[in-house]
Every structure is written in C-alpha cells, then in structure tokens.
Amino acid sequence: MLGLWGQRLPAAWVLLLLPFLPLLLLAAPAPHRASYKPVIVVHGLFDSSYSFRHLLEYINEMGQYGDTDYLKWLFPTSMRSNLYRICYSPWGQEFSICNYWHDPHHDDLYLNASSFLALINGERDHPNATVWRKNFLRVGHLVLIGGPDDGVITPWQS
C-alpha cells in the first residue's frame, strides 16, 4: 500500500504520540476474536469488484467488530463536551475517531470540517459521490444493530 501513495514522513504530532502506542495496543482486540475494523468496509466500497468479493467473504467469516470500552478511558466525561473542538480541527481529522465524529449540536462545523464521515454519508458534495453510492448498492445484505445498552455509541441515538 505504501508504494501506491509514495513515502512521506509522519506529522510531528505522530512522533509525539509514539510513547503512548503501548497503551493503545492494550486496547486492541484479542487475537482469538480476529475482528474487523469499520474502515475495512469503507475501503472495500472503493476497490474493484474483485477485491470487493474478498471483502464480503472476510466480513462473513469474521463477524462482529468488538467493543469500544477503551474510548471511555481515553475521553472521560469532562472532555466530552469539548471533544468537537478537537475533532473538527484540521489536525483532529487525522485521528480515526474524529473521522467518525458527528456532534449533532455542531452540525455546521461537522459539515464544513469533516473530511470523511460527511463525504461517506453524502452530506457534502464531492467528485466521487456517484461512484461511492454505486459501490454501496453492491452490498448484498446489510444488517445494522444498535441500542441503548450496546456501549458502542454514546448517546446511542446519535
């Protein structure tokens, strides 16, 4: 994959976060659960039909993603009310959690600053929107389940 995009040096903030990498590794799913990440699904929507078929097979074999309990540790209650300020900044969009962040109290910031979720959801126009919609329609069967006690999204109504 690196060959496709060329080599580039990491941003300075990445180097500052390297000492915290062991903490993030503790939050990674156990190997026996072999869960997939949502970004794999998104990546598959933009690939060719050949690799898309492999993606569908992989998802069917692997099942559920896992849990996100570690987010409560990373972002305690005191930070929740201000997290949008970080996520809707240009450097905040470099973090995967901020790419999936949609604060309904700050829709204007979300629509203007989101470099991923607003595009995927079709809430902001972009050149690839038609192709992405066409690829999403190729998904044969999609089941999305959520509720107040799943612990994945807080508040779950979002």
Image (tube, rainbow, N blue to C red):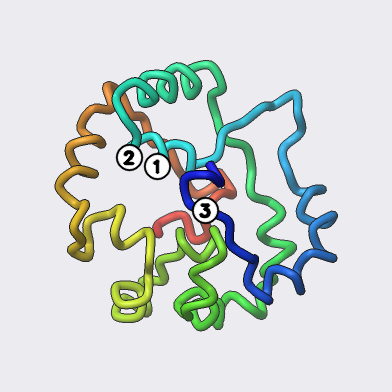
Crowding at mark 2 (Cα within 10 Å: few <14, some 14-19, many 20+): some
Dot 2 or dot 3: first in sequence order is 3
Q: Is residue 149 above or below residue 155?
A: above
Q: Is residue 25 above or below residue 108?
A: above
Residue type of the residue flagged with mark 3: Gly
Q: Quadrant of residue 141?
A: top left
| Residue located 79% across and 64% down the image | 18
Which residue is tagged 2?
46
| Residue located 76% across and 54% down the image | 24
- The C terminus appears in which quarter of the rendering? bottom left
Answer whether labels 3 and 1 touch (C-beta < 8 Å).
no
Of residues 149 and 34, the one nearer the viewer is 34
Residue type of the residue flagged with mark 2: Phe
Answer whether labels 2 and 1 touch (C-beta < 8 Å).
yes
Residue type of the residue flagged with mark 1: Val
Which residue is tagged 3?
6
Q: Which residue in the rendered view is the most extreme toward the left? A: 130
In this rendering, which labeled residue sits more in front, label 2 or label 1? 2
Using the numbered discs, state the Cα–Cα distance from disc 2 to disc 3 in whole angstroms. 19 Å
Residue 42: which numbered mark, if any?
1
Please state if 102 lies on the left or on the right of 7 as rendered.
Answer: left
Please state if 109 lies on the left or on the right of 150 as rendered.
Answer: left
| Residue 91 x, y percent position in the rendering | 53, 76
Please state if 20 lies on the left or on the right of 90 as rendered.
Answer: right
| Residue 115 x, y percent position in the rendering | 38, 66
